[in-house]
Amino acid sequence: MPDRPVLITAHRIGSRRLIAATCPRAAALGLHPGLSVTEAQARHPGLAITEADPEADRHALLGLARWCLGLTPGVALTPVENGSNDACADGLWLDASGCAPLYAPDQPAAEDRLRRTLLARLARLGIAARAAIADTPGAAHALARHGAPGQTDPLPLPVAALRLDATTCDRLDRLGLSRIGDLATLPRAPLERRFGRNRLAAGRTVLLRLDQLLGRVREPLPWLPPPGRIAARLHVFDPLVTAEGLARAIDALATDIATRLRAAGEGALGLELRLERCDNTTQTRRLGLAAPNADAAHLAKLFTTRLDELDPGEGVETLCLTVCRRARRAAHQHAVLMADTSQEAHPDPICDLIDTLSHRPGLHALWRPRLRESDVPERAFQRLPAHMPIPASPARAWPRPTRLIDPPCPVQAIAELPDAAPAQFVWQGRRHRIRCADGPERIAGEWWQRDGERRAVRDYFRVEDTDGHRFWLFRRGDGQLCETGDLRWFLHGIF
Amino acid sequence: MPVAVSAPFDNAKPAAPPSQKLISSLETTPQNIDFIRKITLLSEDRAFCARRSASIDLLIFGIPVIDAHLGGGLSPCALHEFAARPGDSEHLACTTRLLVTLLAINRHLRGPVLWACSRADLYPPGLAIAGFDPARLIVAEMADAHIPAVMEEALRHRGLAAVIGETRRNPGLTLSRRLHLAAQTAGRPALLLRRFGTDDTPSAATTRWRIGPAVSPPPSDRLAALWLDPPRLHLDLIRCRGGMPASWTLTCHDDIPHPLSVAAPLADRPPAPRPATQFRRLA
């Protein structure tokens, strides 16, 4: 298209106005980013110059990244590390682990096929892109920018592919190290002395970049959250090892999450905290909440109370708090504004309590009873999760003990007649002589529940011993038909 | 230098209490200051309790004799300790019955009740018989050592009617003091149930009770032995801050408005055991 003008974008660095990006034709004319605009204009008068808009670029790239989420589950923006502006990104990382077979099943070059599919789709959108698939993010980054199409080995690439700044590249060039392969074969100690982590700034960490490229060091990537998902992420420069540090980081994450939840009018029902440690391991803690909650202090407390169960190891460098499940929050005014502070208006305190208790160490179970329509004592109530609303229970007429011994404890009882109340029984080595008794209350088995209960019968007696203790005893069987039970006695409850 | 302390005693009489006179003659040595601070804290504590009690309904038994003995009822913002009587089983059945009856009578205690325990033998249908709605119950099962901490945590949350904890041992002076303070701040009762009543280590509970079954009236004839009278409880108030120990025998009825009554002390006693000598003489 010869009629289109040669386009460059310009930005201002200090007092100088430099080229930020060039169109392919401008690049063919020898213009490159970093050249001053005045010089470019002197060389080629009639250039079309527009101001660079990094914010819009980033926005467009984010849009592209979200589009890429349709191809692979993990997409991250690549920051420009050798450029002047750290905030702008010029590429994308796609985590294609396990995705390739979806695009080319049973083919040996599945990954290449995926790459070409991606490029073809991008070309259809009018985007000229370069892509490379490699084992590490560093290698993929290097191959996509500096490699030939289809190249898979990053070692012959120039050292600039290591995401190093121009000064370091120059320095390496002067040492005769122009290829990544040259660097990789060198002994590490002298290299570290010259370009070590501590001697020079973080951007110049040659060894770190080399290790990341070769996969010796894992590189945490800032993965984009799926759209609509509420998640907060915190990278820390100094790995966290202390409980206080972790608690502060969790507080910060919870505040972020809670603000966004409140803005959406929602509350979290399930949370996941992921800790990425320096030693390439990840710990995950998940928890659920009784009711949708968007209180930052409460959310943070649920994690910080069990902080001692986390193992920071050599240090935690990334924390990620994600809302797995959420729901709309019931709108309620703050207690300060309410004239009457009745229980009905505030269902939240109990839910807060249930959350707090259910994440306490040492808790075995947290439940609320719901009475059921069943005469078999074991089935007369059901344990429900504590956050579920329980209807008011119907009144009962038959006497029932306050404590149930479950399963029923077999006792040695002596009764005058097979179908009469016992005269005495022995429980836990103690003999209880029975003064008076009431019964039997005959409870038949629920044949619709289990086949074994078809003929089963229990005869319950309330008995009082000579000390005044009241027990709930039953005899298995009605005393007449042997298939109803074997006439053994059991203690089932204490009044 | 002499110090004068005007302690805000809740039962302040026109004349200065004797302890004030004592303090005013003390020197400001570190020990004395510590003593004065303790006295002041204690009196503030009592004044706070008094203010609370004046504004909050007391926990009543519904029996004039007992309520009058307790000065109107149990304080609803305090720790109360209930234990089984020595020789009783560790299932605390009688204590449970009395507690849920109290919770049912005191309708001003609204909302759920947290029951922290280490063994799950609580039987909600039996609690319903005593007039307590099982839908109000939240049961937290946990190891015995965690129970005082969980009770304290629960007392900090609004919306609970009462917090009940069943422990095997006495939590000790420090923990019970913490529980008492938490209950005081929260304005709702903390009720501690102890499985074994034999252990008499000190506790900061405002009242300490021992509860056990009492023998019901003897059957008058053979037919009467075939049915049961309403159950009876024996209550020992063994410690009461600002009150005297006492004992009562109660009868539990199934009717909700007045489920408790004092059993007549003289009627329906078990017959006195006959001296063995009579038998010898007969022989």
Image: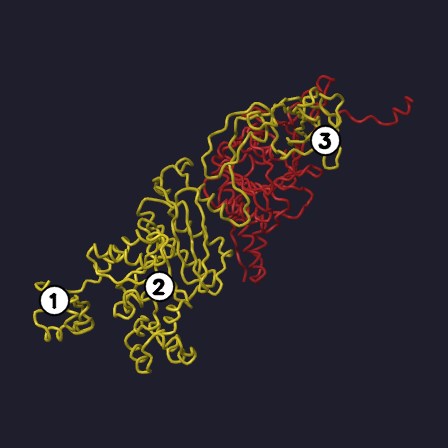
Chain colours: A yellow, B red
Residue A227 screen position, x and y as percent: 31, 50
Question: What residue is shown at x 29% (from left), y 54% (from top)?
Answer: A68
Residue pushed farthest front? Answer: A107
Precedes in sequence: disc 3 or disc 1: 1
Q: Would residue A334 be found to the left or right of residue B52 on screen?
A: left
Q: Residue A6, labelled with which disc?
A: 1
Q: Residue A437, labelled with which disc?
A: none
Q: Chain of mark 3?
A: A
Q: Residue A134, labelled with which disc?
A: 2
Q: Which residue is mark 3?
A: A467
- Given residues A60 and A158, the one toward you in this image is A158
Precedes in sequence: disc 1 or disc 2: 1
The quadrant holding residue A46 is bottom left
Q: Which SS class for mark 1?
A: loop
Quadrant position of the C terminus of chain B in the picture: top right
Residue A429 screen position, x and y as percent: 75, 37
